[in-house]
Amino acid sequence: MSNDDTIPKRVRSTVNRFGNCAVQWIKNRNDEYDPVTYREMWTAVEELALACRELGVRRGDHVGLMSDNRGEWLLTDLALLSIGAADVPRGSDSTDQEIAYILAHADCKVTFAEDDNLARKILHHRDNLPQLHTIVVFDHDQSGTADDPTIRIIPFSHLASRGTVLRSETSPGAFDEEIDTGSGDDVATILYTSGTTGEPKGVLLPHRSFAFQIDRVKNILGLDETDIFLSVLPIWHSFERAVEYIVLGYAASIAYSRPIGKIMLADIARLNPTWMTSVPRIWESIYSTVIQKVSKESPLKRVVFQLFLSIGIAHAHLRNLFRGLVPNFTKRSRLFDRLLSAIPLLLLAPLASLGGRLVFKSLKNRLGSRFVAGVSGGGALPPHIDRFFQAAGIKLLEGYGLTETGPILAVRPESGPVPGTVGRLLPDIEFRVVGEGGEILGPNQKGVLFVRSPQVMLGYYKKPDETAQVLNDGWLNTGDLVRFSHDGDFTVIGRVKETIVLLGGENVEPTPIEETLVQSEFIEQAMVVGQDQKFLGALIVPNFDRLAEYACLNQLSFADHTDLIDHDKVRELFNGEIHGLVNHKKGFKSFEQIFRFAVLPRSFAAGEEITLTLKKKRDVITSRFRKEIEALYR
């Protein structure tokens, strides 16, 4: 990878070698997929780039890209990168305040928008967007959006048509000359982190971040031009974004679907893809569907299913043991593992094969005959989900990364995945595992992961203090607690920083939610939980004096605090308080709302569970109230 390498240069190289291969599969009006070749896409990219230049977009500019997954998204992205601009993406489900903040903070003069509804969201905050002068709308109803006197509204189709004319009038080598000007250090995108703080941070990712990942994933996934990726994640998300570029780097193709069971499975049947990028929630949903279906069967069929599931799990573990695919946290003899597993593996093989035909065949068939693996990121894969799909003979490759690293730092290799880990760090990534005292730790020791690599962000846009807190001499503090094996595979144990990552990949900042909850006269303390779960929960410490008054007014008899919080009316009280404070009307997104809660019989202890300055020790609280937290997710 040279320092002059950029995403457009990589894609141009692929176009020159595989121009007639499909790059995208786009749904038509009949819900069938039509292929778009690399050469067709690249022509459209060149035309759009020329049209963007005419709009006034210049090298170094930041351009908003507020849209969900669609074929035009990738065209726009590549067009902007080709002329040296950086895009600033977000999905259409973002609040108008969030979008307005991002466009203003990133100094966007031009933005693309999904449809007229999103354009109206932007126009609603036009007074806070003094630099914005143009909105290009992908799906534009000619009568749907009234022009603002200070902001132009341009249908994407008009911009594309103008690009066709400009291409015919422009010298043949001009587009390539513009691409050749680019450098790997140029900013490719500014990805704003999620959160409820009102000021998300803009992660500056250069072209070299993505080029670095493209070069190192080849041997891990083994991709070529015959592969089709099914995309169900938001295209602007860092994980999906990196996958898009990896697909383009190896002449594979991508098809857009939705993470809805019926739609996704129907699209799999149409395309017969080889890979699917996903978050853990998708696999948990498939698992739940299977379990629910089994629960409605006869007792005999339920027993048979459980029997073969147990056999499948045991067989998969023995197979991994025999192949040396178990985490080597404490040094072990691989020869001994082989000898120990060989005979039971042979004995279970016929039963596991029978279970594959009787129990799991239909599930595997629904993923298609060419399916290689699902790549799961955006949160930890629950162990029981991992074991289930191993038993079913369906390969899941768990990955790990951060938006600040573009994001892929590690992923289980397709040829030899080690369950219970996220694989090994990509080649050429420097790393340290640092203990509480700053000491460098070795294998099987828990510490904070620091990494240094060309893929690490340049910093947070306009936030030098926040950048300095996590980035020093090229070393990025990931904020994640990890443990490495002697073979280099590692597992993520938890997060030092407070951000909660749900199963769906949503990042949640708990502090603003907790600060809102304690506004209730009945809530003294609160801690939001939900790391690697489907939804948020909360530990609630009541204001016992105020709660006792409520009990007396409502004639609730109780002996002590434990007795009091068990009353149904008290549960109803807290349910009303929580949902009255944390809801959509108050600016909280659906995934930021509390679905279940536990009322605790005592306050957090100062000096033990909270510091003397009243800061929560989340790891300590999580450990001491583990049973209560686990009960929220049963």
Image (spheres, rainbow, N blue to C red):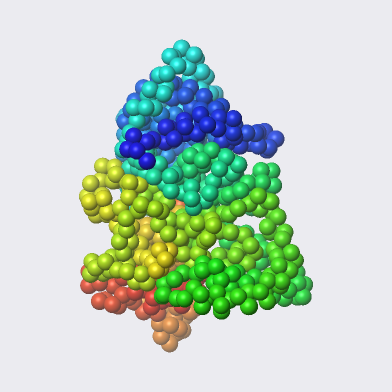
Residue 138 visible in rendering:
no
Residue closer to the observer: 520 or 509: 509
Q: Which residue does the image show at 51% across and 69% down from the upper left?
A: 324
Q: Position of residue 78 (x, y in %)?
A: 45, 32
Q: Position of residue 299 (x, y in %)?
A: 75, 75
Q: Which residue does the image show at 58% across and 61% down from the upper left?
A: 284
Q: Where is residue 497 in the image (x, y as percent from the top left)?
A: 33, 61
Q: Give the vertical position of 48 relative to 517 (above or below).
A: above
Q: Which residue does the image show at 70% across and 35% down from the upper left?
A: 30
Dividing the image into 4 quarters, which one contains the N terminus?
Answer: top left
Residue closer to the observer: 88 or 321: 321
Q: Which residue does the image show at 40% across and 68% down from the upper left?
A: 485
Q: Position of residue 242 (x, y in %)?
A: 45, 45
Residue closer to the observer: 132 or 377: 377
Dividing the image into 4 quarters, which one contains the C terminus?
Answer: bottom right
Which quadrant of the structure image shows residue 290? Answer: bottom right
Residue 351 visible in rendering:
yes
Would you say 619 lies left or right of 394 here? left
Would you say 258 lies left or right of 182 here? right
